[in-house]
Image (cartoon, rainbow, N blue to C red):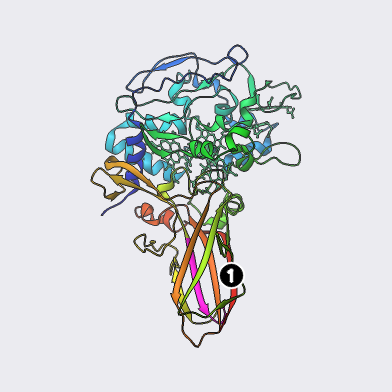
Amino acid sequence: MKINALKIILLFYFVCVGCKKNINEPSESTNESLFPYKNYSIGDDGNLIFSEMSVDDFQPASDCAECHQTHVNEWEMSPHGRSLTNKFFNNCLNDVKEEYGDEFQKVCFQCHTPANLIATPSISGNSPQVGLSCDICHTMTQTSNGTVTSPDRLVTNKYYLNPGEGIKYGPIENPEPNINHESQYNPIFSQSQICLPCHDLRNEELETEITFTEWNRIPGLAMSGTAPCQQCHMQEKEDGTHSHHFAGVDLSYEVTPEDDPQYENVLELIQTSANLSFQNSDGNLGDSIIRDSILVIPVQVESTNGHDLPSGTSFNRDCWLSIEIRSENSSGEILYQSGVLDHFLQLLNYRDSELTFFTSFLITEDGDTTNDIFKADDIINYSLPGMSKKNVEYSFQMDESINQIWVSAKLLFRPIKPYLFNEYPELQVNIPIYTIDEIEKNIQIIN
Ligand code: HEC
Ligand code: HEC
Ligand code: HEC
Ligand code: HEC
Ligand code: HEC
């Protein structure tokens, strides 16, 4: 089966061309008179019919650097800052254009550069690409729903923005005045809802990329408002400002992981997503086990994550347990292995019944696994739900002569399944494998 990045795109296309109704109303909790927004209207073909906004109303990030240098630096290396320039995205977009014509880019632009869809072109004639610049978020006055795809409309999501008025909306209740812009406090900046329009994508009923929904489903989390997206993805610093690195799991893949300015941020975040321990629901694995012909090692994966692991484009990600059991110590004879790769680009064997993995698969109408997005009719989700626990047991035959074993468990994460980059070998060599957590233990075998 030939699998290429186009097929990933097809998913986006497939899921984005499917929606009957998505004229979202602003959420009721916000106050319309306090927080105005500008109107626009888009036809079924994705073309703008009218708009009260111009692309010129969205200031480039360079306009902010004089006073918000750190925000600009962090944003530039973030996936939001790279939403139009990153190679993976552009490879996908080129394939979309070639295969389906230029119009189809609009499906992608609704989240990767919304201003270019909802605002009239720049009066200078050449319409600069806005991307996910500061003003996309900081002119947002009201929250919207997630994106639900439609078979008869190219563009379905809806934004409530008030650009071009010299007002920046943000989380500071009493901002210092400045000569450049008016500042206005808006409580949505501290809530997950501000991320919702782009981080929740459904193909009608099919839950394709539903990070917000996963967060919302964790009992107690959304209701109490204790752990919004910002708590983990925009951490507060000593000076009270918030990180704009927006670390997730992706890098640019254009340089080796260690040379990517976002690498350390991703590594730091990803290590907070789950913990491993040698235990099951009955308790911890002790320092000794009574000899038996079959030994059982229990491993628990405990999510400390605010949504599924992996989330979003979960079908592109690999996350799995790598288990090794040796006689005597870490350099002893191998007694048992699962999920151990010889090469970092090796494919995982998802048919191995002993492999513990977290990912999702797209399924065709006939029930086959596919990466052909047009055929995707269902998604089978093996991700680890946020704040949940998964217990697994590894059993193996024991030789009578062995008196001590060494057990090691690693939870590994690969942001891109390697075959997705088969057509881009220059990106493929830069796919990292992260260790989320690792544990090891020596165990005496007693008679
Ligand atoms: C001349 C300096 C200057 C420039 C240029 C500038 N800002 Fe500001 N901005 C400030 C100051 C000062 C504050 C208040 C900070 C505080 O109170 O801690 C502020 C506050 C903000 C806030 C917080 C508002 C709130 O109430 O929470 C946002 C958002 C913001 N600016 C965005 C931007 C963006 C986006 C740009 C570029 C398009 C920009 N600023 C350009 C000086 C500037
Ligand atoms: C309790 C902390 C926490 C909260 C709350 C949280 N996240 Fe995450 N997020 C993480 C961690 C850790 C990762 C890296 C592991 C992973 O992929 O899940 C991550 C990864 C991601 C990714 C990349 C996912 C992937 O696997 O492709 C996206 C996108 C994301 N988060 C968005 C959000 C959004 C949007 C919200 C709010 C609705 C949110 N996160 C809430 C901790 C959190
Ligand atoms: C994806 C949306 C998004 C983008 C893009 C974005 N911001 Fe923010 N920004 C936020 C949110 C959300 C907060 C509030 C975080 C919180 O309070 O937890 C914030 C806070 C701020 C603040 C208030 C001080 C602070 O750090 O809390 C300033 C100033 C600011 N942003 C400037 C910028 C500038 C300048 C850019 C572009 C270089 C930018 N932002 C891009 C969402 C965004
Ligand atoms: C206007 C749409 C939009 C909004 C609003 C938005 N995002 Fe994003 N976000 C994106 C897109 C598009 C990407 C992927 C960019 C790329 O890689 O090309 C992304 C990527 C990310 C990633 C990195 C995922 C990865 O795989 O590494 C994180 C983390 C993230 N966003 C968090 C947030 C949080 C937190 C908020 C709310 C404060 C937010 N986003 C608001 C569109 C948006
Ligand atoms: C509903 C909003 C939305 C739409 C529509 C959308 N994207 Fe994205 N895209 C995102 C978000 C959010 C992410 C980050 C997701 C994550 O890390 O889980 C992303 C990530 C990506 C990535 C990186 C994926 C990965 O697994 O690392 C590519 C490539 C991409 N998008 C291409 C496209 C293309 C091409 C289209 C149009 C066919 C498109 N997107 C349409 C929101 C969107």
Number of on-image labels: 1
**How busy is the neighbourhood of tag 1: few (under 14 within 10 Å), some, or many (20 plus)?**
some
Of residues 327 and 14, the one nearer the viewer is 327
* Residue 308, percent from left and from top: 50, 46
Quadrant field for ligand 1: top right
x%, y% of residue 154?
Answer: 34, 26
Residue at the image position 48 percent from the left and 28 percent from the top? 128
Q: Magenta part of the protein: which range?
A: 321-330
Image quarter (top left, top right, bottom left or bottom right) of the N terminus: bottom left
Give the side of residue 4 with respect to residue 433, left or right. Answer: left
Q: For mark 1, what is the residue?
A: 440
Identify whether 203 is placed above or below 183: below
Residue furthest left in the image: 366
* Callout 1: CB less than 8 Å from ligand 2: no
Whether 185 is among the magenta residues is no
Above or below, 43 against 407 in this view is above
Along the line of sight, which residue is nearer the eye, 311 or 382?
Answer: 382
Residue sitting nearer the eye, 161 or 192: 192
Amino acid type assigned to the residue bearing label 1 in the image: Glu
